[in-house]
Image (tube, grey):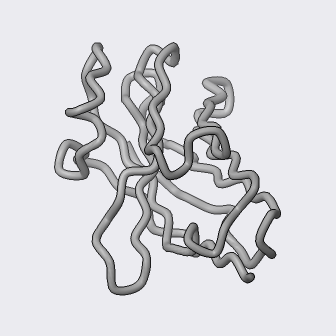
Amino acid sequence: VQLQACGGGLVQAGGSLRLSCAASGRSVSQYAVAWFRRAAGKGREFVSAISSTGDTTDYADAVKGRFTISRDTAKNTVYLQMNSLKPEDTAVYYCAAAGGPYYISSYYSRANTYGYWGQGTQVTVSS
């Protein structure tokens, strides 16, 4: 599967953005799809994931209640709706896919679980 992320940009604190991760080659319903981010000078951080069945979603504590992950199987796309953005959300955001029928948070929140990655999209939140 190939992944292409887009939707990043510059937004003021408190604003919103919606990231998209478009898949091609295989259906997103065959994969758990996650969003990770990497801020300048920091390591890659788990943000959110949705299971291959689409019925389980997972969030990092830092974004819980502000971000929502969803998918549209007809468009073969996974979305990350980001509301109430904060300057500390500034980072390059990446989407990633990994196979597996059962969602286990401790497994799918690890970057090295994922074998397929999209290019990053920059999100910058100004104060």
Could you say where residue 86 lies in the image, as x and y percent from the top left?
66, 67
Please tell me which residue lies in front, 85 or 31.
85
Q: State whether residue 109 is above or below residue 27.
A: below
Query: What residue sits 35% from the left and 41% below the top?
Result: 97
Image quadrant where residue 60 sits: top left
Q: Residue at x 61, y 24 (%)?
A: 73
Q: Is 39 left, or right, of 103 in this rendering?
A: right
Number of numbered tags placed on the structure image: 0
The x and y percentages for residue 79 are: 63, 42
On-image quarter of the C terminus: bottom right
Q: Residue 42 sits in which quadrant?
A: bottom left
Locate the N terminus by quadrant: top left
Asked which quadrant contains residue 10, the reply is bottom right
Q: Which is nearer the eye, 98 or 104?
A: 104
- Seen at 82% across and 63% down, the residue is 15
**What is the x, y in percent for residue 26?**
42, 32
| Nearer the observer, 115 or 126 | 126
Q: Residue at x 61, y 30 (%)?
A: 71
Left or right of 91: which side holds 112? left
Q: Residue furthest bottom?
A: 41
Q: Is residue 51 above or below residue 26?
A: above
Residue 45: % across, % down = 35, 59
Viewed as shown, does residue 53 lie left or right of 17? left
